[in-house]
Image (cartoon, rainbow, N blue to C red):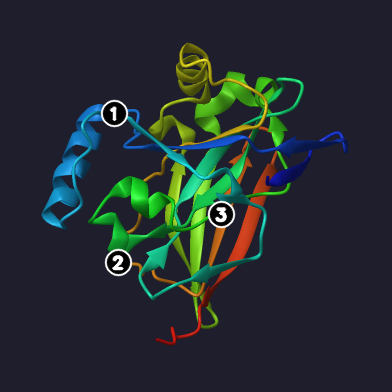
Amino acid sequence: MAVLTFELPDGTTREVAVTQVLNAGYAGRSQDDVAAHVAELAELGVPAPSVTPALYPVAPYLAQQTEAVAAQHARTSGEAEWALVVAGDGELLLTAACDHTDRDLEVHGVAWSKNAGPDVLARRAWRLADVAPRIDELTLRAWVTHGDRETEIQDGTLAELLTPAYWVDVLRAREALVPGTVLISGTIPMAHDVDQFADAWRVELGDPATGDTIGLTYAVRALPTPIG
């Protein structure tokens, strides 16, 4: 069982034994924009979901706080997200996350691709209650590194995504709002002119009201060539 540790702004920590991980997909606030995105992906061979927004269960051990992700080939990439974490006492935490996805496998099944790589989470978190009144103002950004050059690939706000409160209601209705639950939000658009298949990813969740940021960085390391 994966155990995550988060430092809160007051210096206290929370250990969370992960019992379930759920990855939201097609989770834009504007479902008209989501429908257009589904159509774009269909042209690339990615199967359309039966309903939007979608919710994909992934193996609990895939929730990781790591500085390196092992990739089985050159077409895997991350995407900037926020994560809702239910702590042991039921307290709701918000942190930065990056869903590392197998893009080749994605055309065969999104759920399969989500289970082929980890959800990397930051080591700091905010109490959701502390930032909920200004949730739409929070920023979400990502950068990719190729060699020694870092380039911004995503830049937006949480106003573009369905809110944590929306997913809290979904989880509660499914009787899934239980300690150890990690829900990953879905992502914002990527810059089309930036190569997502990178040597490293960096994601930052920011609070303009306080100037505080929560970040994560990890390298993407190719696995050795298979033998046999």
Q: Is mark 3 on a helix, strand or loop?
A: strand
**Percent from the top left, x then y, of residue 178?**
62, 22
Determine contact: label 2, label 3, CB under 8 Å: no
Identify which amino acid the numbered label 1 is placed on. Answer: Ser
Classify residue 186 as left or right of residue 85: left
Disc 2 vs disc 3: which is toward the camera? 3
In this rendering, position of residue 210 left or right of residue 202:
right
Tell me the quadrant of the picture where the C terminus can be found. Answer: bottom left
* Earlier-in-chain disc, 1 versus 3: 1
Residue type beneath disc 3? Val
Residue labelled with disc 1: 30
Asked which secondary structure carries label 1, the reply is loop
Q: What secondary structure is marked by label 2? A: loop
Q: Mark 3 points at which residue?
A: 203
Residue 103 position (above or below residue 158): below
- Identify the residue at the far top of this view: 173
Q: Which residue does the numbered mark 2 point to in the structure image?
A: 193
Residue 88 pos. (x, y %)? 75, 26
| Number of numbered markers | 3
Mark 2 is on which residue type?
Asp
Q: In which quarter of the image is the N terminus?
A: top right
- At a point 50% along the width and 20% down the height, the residue shown is 171
N-term-proximal mark, 1 vs 2: 1
| Image coordinates for residue 182, horizontal then vertical, percent | 58, 35
Q: Along the line of sight, which residue is nearer the eye, 96 or 184?
A: 184
Q: Distance between the residues labelled 1 and 3?
A: 23 Å
